[in-house]
Every structure is written in C-alpha cells, then in structure tokens.
Amino acid sequence: MSRLVVKNGRVVDPSQELDRIGDVAIEDGIIKELGKNIDATEAEAFDASGLVVAPGFIDIHVHLREPGFEHAETIETGSRAAAAGGFTSICCMPNTQPVNDKATVTSYIISQARQHAVVNVFPIGAITKNSAGEELAAIGSMKEAGIVAVSDDGKPVMNARVTRRAMEFARALDIPLIQHCEDLHLSAGGDMHEGLQSTRLGLRGIPRSAEDVMVARDLILAEATGVQYHVAHISSRHSVEMVAMAKQRRLKVTSEATPHHFVLSDADMRPYDSNYKMKPPLRERTDVEAVTKGLVDGVIDAIATDHAPHPGAEKMQEFERCPFGIIGLETSIGLALERLYHSGKIGLLPFVRLFTTNPARILSLSRGTLRPGSAADLTILGLDHEWIYDVNRSPSKSRNTPFNGYRFRGGPVATIVAGRIVWRAGA
Amino acid sequence: MGKGLLEIESLTREEIDAILARSKDFQPGPGQAFKRFDILKGRTVVNLFFEASTRTRTSFEIAAKRLGADTLSITASGSSVSKGESLVDTLNTLGAMRPDAIVMRHEASGAPHFLSRYLPIPIVNAGDGTHEHPTQALLDARTILDRRGTLEGLRIAIIGDIAHSRVARSNIFLLSKYGVQVVLCGPASLLPREMGQIAPGVSLTNNIEAAIRDVDVIMMLRVQLERQHEAAFPANEYFQFFGLRPEHLELAKPDVVVMHPGPINRGREISSEVADSQRSAILNQVENGIAVRMAVLERVLAG
C-alpha cells in the first residue's frame, strides 16, 4: 500500500465548495480522506503549508502531435509539459497523422499514453473522416475505444448539413461536439486579426466575422439538434455575446478561452514574430476584455491552452509562411492567476473551477474533484510563487511561445497524478 | 535609423529630412549627367530580389555604383531559393560572405524585419509584400519637393488598390509626418476602413472626383491584377470609376502634379493623355529614385 499525505495546505475544491486549511490523504492512487492532523506516519508527507491544494487541473484542448508529427511533440513530452504546467489531465485533439478518426487510432493513443504519459490523456476523436468535413467518422466505435468528445479542430466543418448530421449523431451517442469556429472562406489567406494592426503591417486579415458566422450557425443547429455543443478557443466579443444568449435560452452550450486570448491583443504582437501567430488570431483590446468578462461571468466555462507545438524551423520563416499555433501548457496557470485572480476579478474557488469542475463537467470526466474515492490527481499552487518562464528548459519539444522570459507571480509548484508526484517546481 | 532602412513608419521627421536634403546633392543639374562619387569605395552591396523588379533593382544598382560600391544582384529564380532553401539559410549564407549591406525585396510582408533580428548586416527594404516600400516614398517626397518646395499644408490623393499597396503605406506614413492631408481613394473592397486610422490626417473616399478636388498631387497606384486572389471588384469597371482621365485634372489645383510608381498600365488606371502630360512627374520620379537611394545607401553604410 502506498500512502501520501499532503499536509497543511489551503484545500480548495469547487466540487465541494471547499476552501479551508487541512490535509489530503491518498492511498493507492485514490483520495482517502480530507481532514485536519491526519496521521502521516508510514506515509510520504508533502508539506503544503502556504500553498493551495486543488483538484488536478484539466486542459481540454491540447495538441500532442503523436502519431505522425513526433518531431514537434510526443505524447510523452507533451504530458511532461502538462505536468510542469500543473495539469494532471489533458485532452488531445485528433489532427494527428493519421487523424484520430477511427477506434484503432484512439486505442493507439490510449496505449501510448498508458506507457509513456505522466498525466492522464483523454483523446478527442474527429467529427468527419480525415477531418475532411464530408463523411462522418466512426464516432460510435471511437467512443467505445475511449474518446471523450468529437472535434475537427483546426479544420472546422464548413458544410452546415454535415454539421447538423454530426450533431444529431453526437447527441444520440451522448458525446459533446467541439467546434473550432472559423468560416474558411472569410478567413482564407489571413495571417492575423483583421483590423488596424493588420492594415498597418500589410498582413492579410482574419476578420472577427469568420468566427462569429460559424458560432451563430452552430448555435442555431445546436438548438435544433439538442447536441451538447462546445465552442473551442472563443476569441471574438460578438461570439461571447452569442454564447451568453444561447445559455440564457438554456441550450447545452459551453465554451473555453485560451490564456493568450485574455492576455494579449493584436496591438501587443511583436511585428512579424510568428510566436504571436495562431488561430483564432489575437484580437483587439475590446475582445480581450469581453473574453475576460466572459470568464468572470461564467459565459466561458473553462480555460484551455490550445497547446500547439511547432518545431523551430517551421516557425523561423516569413510570417505568412509560418504555421499557426503556440505552446501554452506551462504558462496557462500563471497567466490566469495574474489576469483573473491577482487582478481581483475572481476569487480562488471560481478560479479553480475554470480548470477543474467545469472542464470535467463539459467532457464528463470523472476528475476535477477531491472527494474521497476519486482519483488522487492534485495540483499544488503557490499563489505568490515568483518564477520566470524559460522555454529552453521546457519538456515540450517545441519552443513557440510569446511568453519566454515572462515574469510570473503565482503558478504550479507540484503536480500529483494518481497519488504520485510527477513534477515539482525547481526539481 | 539604427541599422538599415526597414520602413518609413518608425523614422522621425528629422531622419527623413536628412535623407531628402542629402539626395539633392546627388541630383544632376539640368542637362547634366549624374556625378560619380567614391564615398562607398571598397564596400559591397548585395541586391537580393525574391520578387521580379527591373526598375527598383536597376535603380539601387546604379545608385550603389555611382557611390563607388561594388554591387551584386541576385534574383530568386535560378538561385538556391528556388531549390527550397529557407530565407534564414539564404541570408546566413550571404551574410557569411560579409557584404556591407543587403538591399532586399520580398513578397512576404515583414520579411526584412524578421531577418534583421537574426542578421547583423544592415538591410534596406526595397519592398516587402503589401507592407512598405520606403525608398519609393522618399523619392516621391523628393519629387514633390522639387515641384512644390514644401510638403506642409498640401492635399494629396492616393488612388487605386490601397489595401495591397506598399507604396501607399510608405507614402501615407511619410506624408502624415509632414501634416499633409492624405485622401485615399479606391473600390471599397480595396480600401479598408482601418486605413483611415493608420496615421493622422488620412481620409477615405470611394469617389475619384471627391478625392481629386483641390489636390496638389495625385498619386496613382498600379492595379495589380496579379495580386487579386478574388473578385474584389468587377475588373472591367475599374477604369470607368477609378482610372485617371484628363477631365479629372480640371477638379484639382491648376498646377497639380500627377505621379505613378510605375510600371504604368495605360488605359487601366491612367489614360495615356494624363501619363504623358506636362503635369506628369513620372519620369522625374524615376530619376529621383537614384538620387534618393544614393542618400539612403550612404546613410546606411556610413554608420
């Protein structure tokens, strides 16, 4: 029997509306009990004095690049980056090579993760075959193999009829459908948000409307089909408004935001630096404010990174030739603490909810709680822990981040997965 | 200026004044030949053109030679670029040969900015994508100064495909620094509303008559049909609504100056009568291109 007691931490668990100093006892990878002065003899003890002890944080939007693009990231390296970022569970998008559009690929990912990953990996399957947007993928058998949602992330389903059929199918299978909302005709050729900055820099723009048009279409179809629908990486202020409206109408609709979309605007971009190039693009200050407000108000349910590794050579090119996406697992909590918690916008319980209870609810994961009997996944945070992000020391295989050298106040200090400490700050 | 010349936007008015003043020294007197100098004797300037351009490349080459520099011109086709070498590798290779400056044209906006972060050699931007073409704006300013004596208080119309024009951007940034009222005109799909905010004193219109009324200078832009990836406007209607014709000139100031960065499309954006008229400064622009580029190269290399 292995036993670990996390002592004297500020235990914050939104699933039980809990915020008090105490201990968490873990036995054989399961939470045994919460309490005070739990006996730690014959157990490993972790002194969490002055630290926050939360349910393991979950990132529901990650690209692990395996199979197919192992030069950019592998399930192992991505999972190590997740651990170093304080995440105990990650959900990986299906745009691998081959695309995760059938049970064999799902099973491969799950088996690789069992062998090599240091955190829990939950695969997301494709909506359509090869994410080509035409024929539905084998969603039913992928679900049996272990996918937790479907998405053609990066390649939105452009055809409204196919989207409708996919939603009907997903609803019947009781699996959420996640859309990367981007009308590809409106965004075609664009490299950054269309606005004053793109006009100044002579770069082709991706208009806000490219996102809004598809969010609007999908919300209409979600209402018609009754699917559980999730908007990935929401970035436009209009889309936030539309999701708020859908929630008022009691649709089964949720959304997520990435840290870069509530921290950076297009005006913060270092000109022609591809570490600021992603989809959706960094938008305007008013959008950043709307996304932040959406997180505070509960219109946006979760923070997800859209961790998108690309090797240096691909990002060391003319801006318009560089692929979209940045890595984000290690900087997510720090950025969120700074912008949401330390700025006084939200308290600690709602903050933790954005990373635990909510993402677990969206994808029906049996995680994100410290209730006795649950998997012993814990994220230990230092709210005033000062650190500087050095991407060259990242366990990720890729280095594409705009936050290298960023000075943080607050961040993860230890990550515990199934009762095992998989990462500790400075170790 | 720091190293090289990447754009007009970040230059100060004093820096621009200095280049414009110096370029006057390099202009030949009436009926005279260009003078030769040995200011850059022993220095090497590489012209690296990833995009075809006869006039700008030739102009830079002549400018460098008149200052006594050795020049070497490389165009993308037939070089390692067409063999799939990355831009960084190409430039590193050239950099290892230690030229004193690289004059570069590239079809990607920001390509010289990106490279200047990695390369210690000064880069002169000879046009980057749809971003800037700084020496074009400088030579345009020199040309206006030759005819008007000052830029301040002028009203200048820029007409054509504003969205995709690096010439327009550089000119807007430059003219705005001198308090010029800049009127931009073009089809709505080629005239983003944000253009009105990129610099002070800029206004927009889709009507060529409104644009030209009482202007001191008309700058026509080349209609780049090759850059139209989509039907942004009905092509056969362009000349009818945005082409510059003799009757338009009546709306402008009597001594209006007509300019065009070339090469001109007669009958597409400008009629032959206007292009060849007394008011046309198109050939002066070409001549001034050399003088201005001499001033730029001297400034970049003398540092």
Image (cartoon, rainbow, N blue to C red):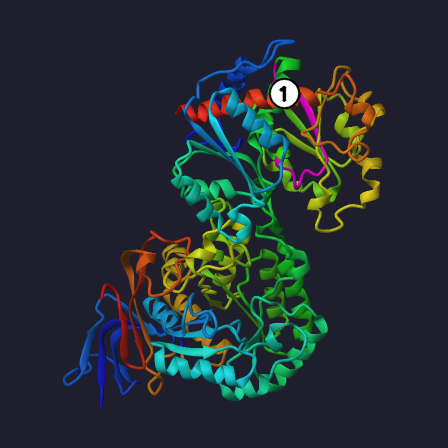
Tell me residue B179's x, y (percent).
59, 23
Q: Main secondary structure of the magenta part?
A: loop
Q: Give the camera-side residue of B107 and B178.
A: B107
Task: Return the x and y of residue A57 as percentages of the image width and height.
Answer: 38, 72
Residue A138 lies, with reference to residue B283, above or below; the image says below
Q: On screen, A161 above or below B52? A: below
Residue that appears at 81% across and 39% down? B238
Judge whether B281 appears above or below B4 on screen.
above
Which residue is at 56% across, 31% downward?
B134
Quadrant of res A51 = bottom left
Q: Nearer the viewer, residue A217 or A313?
A: A313
Please, which chain is the residue tagged with disc 1 on?
B
Number of marks in the rendered image: 1
| Residue at horizontal 65 percent and vertical 22 percent from the top | B285
Q: Residue B172: tell me if it is visible.
A: no
Query: In this figure, which residue is indicated by the disc labeled 1?
Result: B287
Q: Is residue B38 magenta?
A: no
A366 and B279: which is toward the camera: B279
What percent of the width, then of the height, locates residue B248? 82, 25
Quarter in which the N terminus of chain A is drawn: bottom left
Question: Given the current orientation, which residue lies at the most extreme front position?
Answer: B78
Q: Which residues are magenta?
A: B150-166
